[in-house]
Structures are given as C-alpha cells and as structure tokens.
C-alpha cells in the first residue's frame, strides 16, 4: 500500500477531490422587484446592470457574460455613491492618461 492509499481517519477512502457534495436544497423563490435594467454590449462582453429591491433593501447587480460564462457582483445601495466615485475617478484617469504603445521587443506585447 502506498501512502496515499491508506484509509482516512476522517471516514472516506475516496481519492482527494472525488468526494461528492450533498445536493443543495432548491432555492426559495426570492421576492425581488426589478426597478431598472440596462444591457451593454462592449466588445465580446455583455453586461447586464439591474437595480433591484428585496425585503433586505436595494442593490445593484452587475452580470458579465462572455461566451456563456457569467460572473456577477452585487453592490448594496448603501455603497453605490462610493462605487460611483471610484468609477468616475477611473474614467477621468483613463481619459487623461494616453495609452501605452506596445513594446515591439516584448513577446507578450506589453
């Protein structure tokens, strides 16, 4: 018997990473109301920005879809002013700073 075939003191003899998780219970239907929704297509990415409200409060959900893969962030309404300030500052810097030209001797293109 090799070392990774020894019985586990934690009860399972399955190889690392092959343990099955118990199935998740179905999600309860959420009581969310959509207040406003916008979709943006930027290059290959689709962004869906939705302002919603539920019993816990208002929030902004931003979903990025790239070729069927989705990533989402949720920003509580209490943080929207701070989020806007950061985005405005990034936009200002992007407008004021000229883009760097790629270095032709760098194989990565940066």
Image (tube, grey):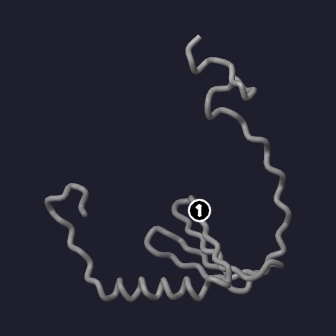
Provide the residue designation for mark 1.
70
Tell me the residue at 24%/61% (across/down): 109
Q: Is residue 82 above or below residue 16?
A: below
Q: Is residue 19 left or right of residue 31?
A: left
Q: Is residue 34 left or right of residue 48?
A: right
Circle 1 residues within 10 Å: few <14, some 14–19, many ≥20 = few
For the view shown, which residue lies furthest in the left direction?
105
Q: Is residue 53 left or right of residue 14?
A: right
Residue 3 percent coordinates (x, y): 56, 18
Quarter of the figure with the N terminus: top right
Quarter of the figure with the C terminus: bottom left
Residue 35 percent coordinates (x, y): 73, 86
Residue 93 percent coordinates (x, y): 35, 85
- Label tally: 1
Badge 1 element = strand
Q: Quadrant of residue 47?
A: bottom right
For the view shown, which residue lies furthest in the front direction?
9
Q: Quadrant of residue 15?
A: top right
Residue 107 percent coordinates (x, y): 20, 55
Tell me the residue at 58%/64% (across/down): 71
Q: Is residue 93 left or right of residue 61?
A: left
Tell me the residue at 75%/26% (across/down): 11
Residue closer to the observer: 18 or 11: 11
């Amino acid at each position: 018997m090799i070392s990774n075939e020894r019985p586990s003191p934690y009860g399972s003899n399955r190889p690392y990473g092959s343990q099955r998780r118990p199935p998740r219970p179905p999600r309860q239907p959420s009581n969310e109301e959509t207040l406003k929704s916008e979709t943006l297509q930027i290059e290959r990415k689709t962004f869906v920005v939705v302002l919603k409200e539920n019993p816990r409060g208002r929030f902004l959900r931003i979903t990025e879809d790239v070729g069927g893969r989705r990533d989402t962030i949720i920003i509580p309404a209490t943080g929207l002013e701070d989020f806007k300030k950061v985005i405005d500052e990034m936009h200002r810097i992007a407008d004021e700073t000229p883009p760097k030209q790629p270095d032709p001797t760098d194989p990565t293109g940066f």
